[in-house]
Image: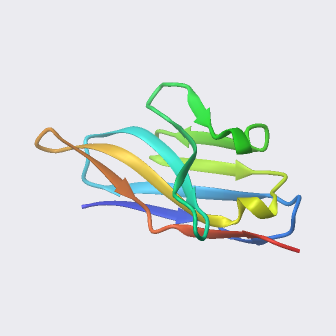
Amino acid sequence: QVQLVESGGGLVQPGGSLRLSCAASGSFLSINDMAWYRQAPGKERELVAGSSNGGSTNYADSVKGRFTFSRDNAKNTIYLQMNSLKPEDTAVYYCSAKFYLPGLTIARYWGQGTQVTVSS
């Protein structure tokens, strides 16, 4: 069984910062791409930032220059440093990763989500 566990969400004032973490655990051979998505009320889930193993990082235009994605392969963990937060960043943030599993299976898993609320 593979799990992704997120942490670090919360309530922050506009202009503030938060750091999200997502740790992968369980039985898998390796992890390919890992990414952060978000879903605001009434909107579709969107990619915030992510990278394939050893590849470059992609960011949504709306977060470029404010958010920083990082990955610690030794810990199977990704982070999202969010600075200069805006009310429009309010959403549930999800971690997602594509795993290579025993038996040559490839599967994408999602975390449970963590709420980020930007409000004064």
Residue located farthest toward the front when viewing the structure as drawn: 42
Name the image quarter holding the C terminus. Answer: bottom right
Q: Is residue 25 visible?
A: yes
Q: Position of residue 55 (x, y in %)?
A: 50, 25
**Residue 32: which quarter of the image?**
top left
Apparent side of residue 119 relative to residue 42 in the rendered image (left or right): right
Q: Is residue 8 visible?
A: no
What is the basis of the colouring in this image? rainbow
47 up-or-down from 56: above or below: below
Name the residue located 55 percent from the left edge and 25 percent from the top edge. Answer: 56
Q: Nearer the viewer, residue 103 or 14?
A: 14
Apparent side of residue 34 relative to residue 64 in the rendered image (left or right): left
89 up-or-down from 52: above or below: below
Name the residue located 61 percent from the left edge and 65 percent from the top edge. Answer: 40
Name the residue located 24 percent from the left edge and 61 percent from the top edge. Answer: 1
Residue located farthest toward the top when viewing the structure as drawn: 55
Q: Nearer the viewer, residue 92 or 4?
A: 92
**Residue 15: which quarter of the image?**
bottom right
Q: How many marks?
A: 0
Q: Nearer the viewer, residue 21 or 90?
A: 90
Apparent side of residue 59 relative to residue 15 in the rendered image (left or right): left
Name the residue located 75 percent from the left edge and 60 percent from the top edge. Answer: 88
Residue located farthest toward the left when viewing the structure as drawn: 103
Q: Position of residue 76 (x, y in %)?
A: 44, 46
Q: Position of residue 11 (x, y in %)?
A: 75, 74
